[in-house]
Amino acid sequence: MGTTLLVIAYALIWLGLLAYLGWLALRMRGVRAELEATRELLERRAGETERRD
């Protein structure tokens, strides 16, 4: 009985850790997409400023 509970506890811990890492990976993907959009916007604005000068 004690060994079974220990195995279940370890399995739940690993599942929780994997779920957390998956959640972090999704957030990182969103942050990267937002960063890329910001870079493109800054490059576009820099190009517009150079044309005005």
Image (cartoon, grey):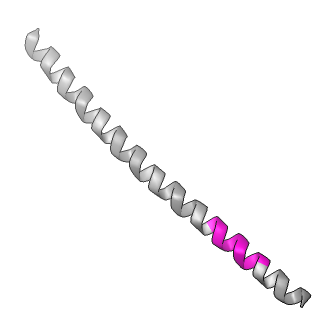
The residue sitting at the top extreme is: 53
Where does residue 26 sit, x and y in percent of width and height?
A: 45, 56
Quadrant assignment for the N terminus: bottom right
Quadrant assignment for the C terminus: top left
Query: What residue do we see at 42% from left, 44% from top?
Result: 31
The answer to whether residue 39 is left or right of residue 10 is left
The answer to whether residue 1 is left or right of residue 22 is right
The residue sitting at the right extreme is: 2
Where does residue 51 sit, x and y in percent of width and height?
A: 8, 16
Please tell me whether residue 46 is drawn above or below residue 10 in the rendered image: above
Where does residue 23 sit, x and y in percent of width and height?
A: 52, 58
Q: Main secondary structure of the magenta part?
A: helix
Query: What residue do we see at 24% from left, 35% from top?
Result: 40
Where does residue 19 sit, x and y in percent of width and height?
A: 58, 66
Picture quadrant where residue 42 is located: top left
The residue sitting at the bottom extreme is: 1
The residue sitting at the left extreme is: 51
Front one among 40 and 10? 10
Please tell me whether residue 14 is drawn above or below residue 24 in the rendered image: below
Picture quadrant where residue 38 is located: top left
Query: What residue do we see at 9% from left, 11% from top?
Result: 52
The reply to whether the magenta stretch includes residue 20 is no
Which span is picked out in magenta? 9-17
The reply to whether the magenta stretch includes residue 14 is yes
Front one among 51 and 13? 13
